Amino acid sequence: MRRIVVLDAPSNLGLRPPAPGTVPGVYKLAGALREQRIVQRLGALEGGVVVPPRYDRGDWREGDGVFNAAAIAAYTVKLADRIEHHLRAGDFPVVLGGDCSIQLGASLAMRRMGRYGLAAIDGSTDFRHPGNSERVGAAGGEELALATGRGQRDLTDLEGLRPYLRDDDVRLFGIRDDDPQIPELRELKIPNASVGEIREWGPETIAGAVRQTLEIPELDGFWVHFDADSLDPEIMPAVDAPDPDGLQPGELVALLGTLAASDHCVGLNITIYDPDLDPDGSAGALLADLVVDALTGHRQD
Protein backbone atom coordinates (compact mmCIF):
# COMPACT_ATOMS: atom_id res chain seq x y z
CA MET A 1 0.00 0.00 0.00
CA ARG A 2 1.52 3.30 -1.08
CA ARG A 3 2.32 6.00 1.42
CA ILE A 4 0.56 9.31 0.80
CA VAL A 5 2.49 12.43 1.76
CA VAL A 6 0.71 15.81 1.72
CA LEU A 7 2.93 18.69 0.67
CA ASP A 8 1.95 22.36 0.45
CA ALA A 9 2.95 24.45 -2.58
CA PRO A 10 1.07 27.71 -1.88
CA SER A 11 2.27 29.66 -4.90
CA ASN A 12 0.10 32.27 -6.61
CA LEU A 13 2.88 33.51 -8.92
CA GLY A 14 1.20 32.33 -12.10
CA LEU A 15 -2.08 34.26 -11.89
CA ARG A 16 -3.06 37.82 -12.72
CA PRO A 17 -4.20 40.03 -9.82
CA PRO A 18 -7.97 39.69 -9.31
CA ALA A 19 -8.16 43.47 -8.75
CA PRO A 20 -5.63 46.32 -8.69
CA GLY A 21 -3.50 46.23 -5.56
CA THR A 22 -4.48 42.66 -4.64
CA VAL A 23 -2.93 39.23 -5.10
CA PRO A 24 -4.63 35.95 -6.06
CA GLY A 25 -5.99 34.10 -3.05
CA VAL A 26 -5.10 30.61 -4.28
CA TYR A 27 -2.12 30.60 -1.92
CA LYS A 28 -4.70 29.86 0.81
CA LEU A 29 -5.85 26.61 -0.86
CA ALA A 30 -3.57 24.37 1.16
CA GLY A 31 -4.63 25.91 4.46
CA ALA A 32 -8.30 25.63 3.57
CA LEU A 33 -8.02 21.92 2.70
CA ARG A 34 -5.99 21.25 5.82
CA GLU A 35 -8.78 22.93 7.78
CA GLN A 36 -11.02 20.21 6.33
CA ARG A 37 -8.63 17.62 7.83
CA ILE A 38 -7.55 16.31 4.46
CA VAL A 39 -4.26 14.98 5.84
CA GLN A 40 -5.96 12.91 8.53
CA ARG A 41 -8.78 11.75 6.25
CA LEU A 42 -6.29 10.48 3.69
CA GLY A 43 -4.24 8.77 6.38
CA ALA A 44 -1.32 10.74 4.99
CA LEU A 45 2.07 11.72 6.32
CA GLU A 46 3.09 15.34 6.75
CA GLY A 47 5.27 16.68 3.93
CA GLY A 48 5.53 20.28 5.11
CA VAL A 49 5.57 23.40 2.96
CA VAL A 50 7.64 24.65 0.04
CA VAL A 51 7.48 28.42 0.60
CA PRO A 52 7.16 30.48 -2.60
CA PRO A 53 8.81 33.82 -3.37
CA ARG A 54 6.90 37.05 -2.95
CA TYR A 55 4.28 37.93 -5.56
CA ASP A 56 5.65 41.04 -7.25
CA ARG A 57 5.13 41.78 -10.94
CA GLY A 58 7.22 44.94 -10.68
CA ASP A 59 6.87 47.10 -13.79
CA TRP A 60 5.75 44.20 -16.01
CA ARG A 61 3.63 45.14 -19.03
CA GLU A 62 1.75 43.11 -21.63
CA GLY A 63 4.24 41.89 -24.18
CA ASP A 64 7.04 41.37 -21.65
CA GLY A 65 6.58 37.61 -21.54
CA VAL A 66 5.62 35.66 -18.43
CA PHE A 67 5.40 37.81 -15.30
CA ASN A 68 7.11 36.60 -12.12
CA ALA A 69 9.22 34.39 -14.42
CA ALA A 70 12.40 34.46 -12.34
CA ALA A 71 10.43 33.69 -9.17
CA ILE A 72 8.52 30.87 -10.90
CA ALA A 73 11.74 29.37 -12.24
CA ALA A 74 13.38 29.43 -8.79
CA TYR A 75 10.27 27.99 -7.15
CA THR A 76 9.94 25.25 -9.79
CA VAL A 77 13.43 23.99 -8.96
CA LYS A 78 12.79 24.19 -5.22
CA LEU A 79 9.48 22.34 -5.49
CA ALA A 80 10.97 19.76 -7.87
CA ASP A 81 13.68 19.00 -5.30
CA ARG A 82 11.04 18.17 -2.67
CA ILE A 83 8.81 16.17 -5.03
CA GLU A 84 11.78 14.22 -6.41
CA HIS A 85 12.79 13.28 -2.87
CA HIS A 86 9.37 11.77 -2.21
CA LEU A 87 9.14 10.03 -5.58
CA ARG A 88 12.52 8.37 -5.10
CA ALA A 89 11.40 7.25 -1.64
CA GLY A 90 8.36 5.56 -3.18
CA ASP A 91 5.90 8.01 -1.65
CA PHE A 92 2.73 9.26 -3.35
CA PRO A 93 2.87 13.08 -3.04
CA VAL A 94 -0.41 14.98 -2.89
CA VAL A 95 0.64 18.57 -3.54
CA LEU A 96 -1.76 21.28 -2.39
CA GLY A 97 -1.42 24.43 -4.53
CA GLY A 98 -1.41 27.14 -5.49
CA ASP A 99 -2.03 28.00 -9.09
CA CYS A 100 -1.41 25.67 -12.01
CA SER A 101 2.21 26.74 -12.48
CA ILE A 102 3.13 24.39 -9.61
CA GLN A 103 2.68 21.55 -12.12
CA LEU A 104 6.06 22.58 -13.54
CA GLY A 105 7.68 21.47 -10.28
CA ALA A 106 6.25 17.97 -10.63
CA SER A 107 7.13 17.81 -14.32
CA LEU A 108 10.73 18.86 -13.71
CA ALA A 109 11.10 16.37 -10.86
CA MET A 110 9.88 13.52 -13.06
CA ARG A 111 12.02 14.62 -16.02
CA ARG A 112 15.12 14.36 -13.83
CA MET A 113 14.19 10.74 -13.11
CA GLY A 114 13.14 9.52 -16.54
CA ARG A 115 10.18 9.68 -18.88
CA TYR A 116 6.79 10.29 -17.28
CA GLY A 117 3.32 11.23 -18.46
CA LEU A 118 0.71 13.70 -17.27
CA ALA A 119 -3.04 13.25 -16.96
CA ALA A 120 -4.61 16.68 -16.44
CA ILE A 121 -8.19 17.20 -15.26
CA ASP A 122 -8.63 20.85 -16.10
CA GLY A 123 -11.36 23.16 -17.31
CA SER A 124 -9.02 24.67 -19.89
CA THR A 125 -6.04 23.45 -21.89
CA ASP A 126 -3.51 25.80 -20.23
CA PHE A 127 -1.76 25.68 -23.59
CA ARG A 128 -1.38 29.38 -24.33
CA HIS A 129 2.04 30.18 -25.82
CA PRO A 130 3.66 32.74 -28.15
CA GLY A 131 2.76 30.64 -31.17
CA ASN A 132 -0.99 30.89 -30.60
CA SER A 133 -1.54 34.02 -28.48
CA GLU A 134 -0.38 37.60 -28.12
CA ARG A 135 -1.45 37.64 -24.47
CA VAL A 136 1.21 35.44 -22.92
CA GLY A 137 1.90 36.46 -19.34
CA ALA A 138 0.20 34.30 -16.71
CA ALA A 139 2.02 30.98 -16.30
CA GLY A 140 -1.05 29.50 -14.61
CA GLY A 141 -2.75 29.46 -18.02
CA GLU A 142 0.37 28.37 -19.86
CA GLU A 143 1.97 25.67 -17.77
CA LEU A 144 1.17 22.78 -20.12
CA ALA A 145 2.70 24.69 -23.02
CA LEU A 146 5.75 25.49 -20.89
CA ALA A 147 6.11 21.90 -19.69
CA THR A 148 6.10 20.66 -23.28
CA GLY A 149 8.77 23.15 -24.29
CA ARG A 150 6.75 26.03 -25.72
CA GLY A 151 7.61 29.50 -24.48
CA GLN A 152 10.50 31.40 -23.02
CA ARG A 153 13.62 29.40 -22.32
CA ASP A 154 14.09 30.52 -18.71
CA LEU A 155 10.96 28.49 -17.88
CA THR A 156 10.98 25.76 -20.52
CA ASP A 157 14.62 24.65 -20.27
CA LEU A 158 15.48 24.55 -16.59
CA GLU A 159 18.58 22.42 -16.00
CA GLY A 160 18.78 21.84 -19.77
CA LEU A 161 15.90 19.32 -19.54
CA ARG A 162 13.50 20.77 -22.13
CA PRO A 163 10.87 19.48 -22.61
CA TYR A 164 9.83 18.17 -19.22
CA LEU A 165 6.90 16.35 -20.86
CA ARG A 166 6.58 14.97 -24.39
CA ASP A 167 3.42 15.81 -26.32
CA ASP A 168 2.56 12.15 -26.75
CA ASP A 169 2.77 11.55 -22.99
CA VAL A 170 0.07 14.12 -22.10
CA ARG A 171 -3.66 13.46 -21.66
CA LEU A 172 -6.34 16.09 -20.95
CA PHE A 173 -9.77 15.60 -19.34
CA GLY A 174 -12.60 18.02 -18.60
CA ILE A 175 -11.86 20.89 -20.95
CA ARG A 176 -14.93 22.71 -22.15
CA ASP A 177 -16.42 21.62 -25.46
CA ASP A 178 -15.76 25.02 -27.04
CA ASP A 179 -12.14 25.46 -25.90
CA PRO A 180 -10.40 27.39 -28.70
CA GLN A 181 -7.18 25.39 -28.42
CA ILE A 182 -8.75 21.97 -29.08
CA PRO A 183 -7.89 22.14 -32.83
CA GLU A 184 -4.21 22.70 -32.00
CA LEU A 185 -4.21 19.76 -29.59
CA ARG A 186 -5.70 17.56 -32.30
CA GLU A 187 -3.10 18.72 -34.79
CA LEU A 188 -0.37 17.83 -32.29
CA LYS A 189 -2.12 14.52 -31.52
CA ILE A 190 -2.38 15.32 -27.80
CA PRO A 191 -5.33 13.19 -26.60
CA ASN A 192 -8.09 15.14 -24.89
CA ALA A 193 -11.63 14.51 -23.69
CA SER A 194 -14.05 17.39 -23.30
CA VAL A 195 -16.88 17.38 -20.76
CA GLY A 196 -19.32 16.37 -23.49
CA GLU A 197 -17.14 13.45 -24.58
CA ILE A 198 -16.69 12.32 -20.99
CA ARG A 199 -20.46 12.20 -20.59
CA GLU A 200 -20.90 10.39 -23.90
CA TRP A 201 -18.48 7.61 -22.98
CA GLY A 202 -18.80 7.66 -19.20
CA PRO A 203 -16.07 8.99 -16.90
CA GLU A 204 -14.83 5.63 -15.58
CA THR A 205 -14.79 4.10 -19.05
CA ILE A 206 -12.89 6.93 -20.69
CA ALA A 207 -10.46 7.35 -17.77
CA GLY A 208 -9.81 3.61 -17.73
CA ALA A 209 -9.15 3.49 -21.45
CA VAL A 210 -6.81 6.48 -21.35
CA ARG A 211 -5.09 5.18 -18.24
CA GLN A 212 -4.06 2.07 -20.15
CA THR A 213 -2.22 4.27 -22.65
CA LEU A 214 -0.10 5.62 -19.77
CA GLU A 215 0.59 2.18 -18.28
CA ILE A 216 3.16 1.31 -20.90
CA PRO A 217 6.80 0.15 -20.63
CA GLU A 218 8.05 3.34 -22.29
CA LEU A 219 6.82 5.42 -19.34
CA ASP A 220 8.16 5.29 -15.79
CA GLY A 221 4.79 6.47 -14.49
CA PHE A 222 2.43 9.43 -14.70
CA TRP A 223 1.30 12.37 -12.60
CA VAL A 224 -2.27 13.69 -12.19
CA HIS A 225 -2.95 17.43 -12.27
CA PHE A 226 -6.38 18.39 -10.90
CA ASP A 227 -7.59 21.95 -11.40
CA ALA A 228 -10.75 22.86 -9.45
CA ASP A 229 -12.06 24.87 -12.42
CA SER A 230 -12.79 21.56 -14.15
CA LEU A 231 -15.88 21.46 -11.91
CA ASP A 232 -19.06 23.27 -12.86
CA PRO A 233 -19.21 26.76 -11.30
CA GLU A 234 -22.63 25.98 -9.85
CA ILE A 235 -20.80 23.77 -7.36
CA MET A 236 -17.29 25.28 -7.54
CA PRO A 237 -17.58 29.06 -8.02
CA ALA A 238 -14.36 29.84 -6.10
CA VAL A 239 -11.97 29.81 -9.07
CA ASP A 240 -10.51 32.59 -11.19
CA ALA A 241 -12.22 31.44 -14.41
CA PRO A 242 -15.61 29.86 -13.55
CA ASP A 243 -16.62 28.71 -17.03
CA PRO A 244 -20.04 27.03 -17.31
CA ASP A 245 -20.82 23.42 -18.23
CA GLY A 246 -18.13 21.76 -16.14
CA LEU A 247 -17.92 18.38 -14.46
CA GLN A 248 -20.31 17.27 -11.75
CA PRO A 249 -18.99 15.82 -8.46
CA GLY A 250 -19.60 12.17 -9.35
CA GLU A 251 -17.93 12.62 -12.71
CA LEU A 252 -14.85 14.17 -11.11
CA VAL A 253 -14.55 11.42 -8.49
CA ALA A 254 -14.85 8.74 -11.16
CA LEU A 255 -12.17 10.34 -13.34
CA LEU A 256 -9.74 11.16 -10.56
CA GLY A 257 -10.30 7.91 -8.71
CA THR A 258 -9.77 5.78 -11.82
CA LEU A 259 -6.54 7.57 -12.72
CA ALA A 260 -5.13 7.69 -9.18
CA ALA A 261 -5.87 4.00 -8.58
CA SER A 262 -3.29 3.00 -11.18
CA ASP A 263 -0.07 1.52 -9.84
CA HIS A 264 1.67 3.73 -12.42
CA CYS A 265 0.25 6.96 -10.97
CA VAL A 266 3.00 8.53 -8.89
CA GLY A 267 1.40 11.70 -7.52
CA LEU A 268 -1.27 14.37 -7.65
CA ASN A 269 -1.51 18.14 -7.39
CA ILE A 270 -4.61 20.22 -6.63
CA THR A 271 -4.85 23.80 -7.86
CA ILE A 272 -6.86 27.02 -8.40
CA TYR A 273 -9.47 26.87 -5.62
CA ASP A 274 -9.46 30.36 -4.06
CA PRO A 275 -10.75 30.61 -0.47
CA ASP A 276 -11.13 34.39 -0.89
CA LEU A 277 -14.01 33.60 -3.27
CA ASP A 278 -15.59 31.12 -0.84
CA PRO A 279 -16.60 33.10 2.26
CA ASP A 280 -18.59 30.32 3.90
CA GLY A 281 -16.04 27.61 3.05
CA SER A 282 -18.61 25.33 1.40
CA ALA A 283 -16.72 24.98 -1.88
CA GLY A 284 -13.53 24.09 -0.01
CA ALA A 285 -15.38 21.48 2.04
CA LEU A 286 -16.74 19.95 -1.17
CA LEU A 287 -13.30 19.95 -2.78
CA ALA A 288 -11.80 18.13 0.18
CA ASP A 289 -14.65 15.58 0.13
CA LEU A 290 -14.14 14.88 -3.57
CA VAL A 291 -10.40 14.36 -3.26
CA VAL A 292 -10.82 12.09 -0.24
CA ASP A 293 -13.54 10.10 -2.03
CA ALA A 294 -11.38 9.67 -5.13
CA LEU A 295 -8.21 8.65 -3.30
CA THR A 296 -9.86 6.30 -0.80
CA GLY A 297 -12.04 4.40 -3.22
CA HIS A 298 -15.22 6.43 -2.66
CA ARG A 299 -15.08 5.96 1.11
CA GLN A 300 -15.63 8.71 3.68
CA ASP A 301 -14.47 8.85 7.30
Image (spheres, helix red, strand yellow):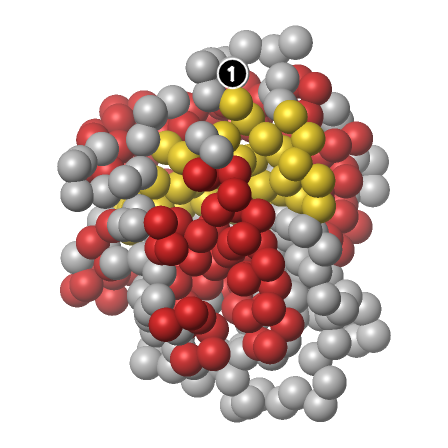
* Residue at horizontal 52 percent and vertical 90 percent from the top: 63
Query: Where's residue 256, x and y in %?
Result: 43, 30
Query: Where's residue 121, x and y in %?
Result: 42, 43
For disc 1, the marked residue is 296
Position of 224 relative to 51 (above/below): above
Position of 27 relative to 19 (above/below): above
* Residue at horizontal 65 percent and vertical 9 percent from the top: 301
Query: Where's residue 215, x and y in %?
Result: 22, 33
Indicate left or right for 44 with 63 as reference. Answer: right
Is residue 283 in view?
Answer: no
Along the line of sight, the residue nearer the viewer: 223 or 157: 157
Number of labels in the image equals 1
Along the line of sight, the residue nearer the viewer: 34 or 205: 34
Query: Where's residue 295, x and y in %?
Result: 50, 22
Indicate left or right for 196 with 26 as reference. Answer: left
Is residue 120 in view?
Answer: yes
Along the line of sight, the residue nearer the viewer: 179 or 44: 44
* Residue at horizontal 63 percent and vertical 17 percent from the top: 43
Image quadrant for the N terminus? top left
Indicate left or right for 198 with 3 as reference. Answer: left
